[in-house]
Image: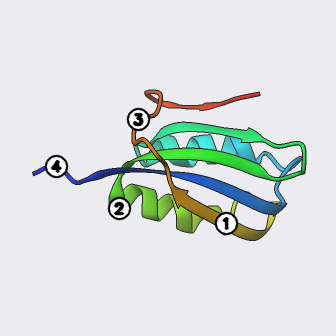
């Protein structure tokens, strides 16, 4: 039986821009077989839509607390997305 799919919208704050956070997020998501996107926001945060198997989404949420070298994450706020449909693959937007 296939594991349940879920999608979350995540906002990551702290020193998360200028440290390759988006590329790191894409790489980690691809390793976990997740779909979605990641982008920088004008307020200095990073937003991501992460969709896939529940266990992979939970793993990614935990990894976001650490981030790449040079990042200093102060908060990872997530909420269930209204739709579990995300673009196939994982991409950096904006």
**Are circles 4 and 1 on residues that touch, CB within 8 Å?**
no
Q: Nearer the viewer, residue 64 or 31?
A: 64
Q: Nearer the viewer, residue 7 or 28?
A: 7
Across and down, in percent, residue 44 comes to: 89, 51
- Residue at x 43%, y 49% (from the top left corner): 32
Closer to the chain start, of discs 4 and 3, is 4
Q: Which residue is mark 1?
A: 76
Disc sitting over residue 55 in the figure: 2
Across and down, in percent, residue 77 comes to: 65, 65
Say which quarter of the image contains residue 62: bottom right
Q: Which residue is mark 3?
A: 85
Label 3 element class: loop
10 Å crowding of disc 2: few (<14), some (14-19), many (20+):
some
In the picture, which quadrant includes the C terminus? top right
Closer to the chain start, of discs 4 and 1, is 4
**Are circles 2 and 3 on residues that touch, CB within 8 Å?**
no
10 Å crowding of disc 1: few (<14), some (14-19), many (20+):
some
Q: Which residue is mark 4?
A: 2
**Are circles 2 and 4 on residues that touch, CB within 8 Å?**
no
- Distance (Cα) linking label 2 and label 1: 17 Å
What colouring style does the render use? rainbow
Across and down, in percent, residue 11 comes to: 69, 56
Closer to the chain start, of discs 2 and 1, is 2
Side of 65 relative to 59 (left or right): right
- Distance (Cα) linking label 4 and label 3: 16 Å
Label 4 element class: loop
- Residue at x 70%, y 47% (from the top left corner): 47
Q: Please identify, in this view, whether the residue under mark 4 or under mark 3 is nearer the observer.
A: 3
- Distance (Cα) linking label 2 and label 3: 17 Å
Closer to the chain start, of discs 2 and 3, is 2
- Residue at x 44%, y 64% (from the top left corner): 58
């Amino acid at each position: 039986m296939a594991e349940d799919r879920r999608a979350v919208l995540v906002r990551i704050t702290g020193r998360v821009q200028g440290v390759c956070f988006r590329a790191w997020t894409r790489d980690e998501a691809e390793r976990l077989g997740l779909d979605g996107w990641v982008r920088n926001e004008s307020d200095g945060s990073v937003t991501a839509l992460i969709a896939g198997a529940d266990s992979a989404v939970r793993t990614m949420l935990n990894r976001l607390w650490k981030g790449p070298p040079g990042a200093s994450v102060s908060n990872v706020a997530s909420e269930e997305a209204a739709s579990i449909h995300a673009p196939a693959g994982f991409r950096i937007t904006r």
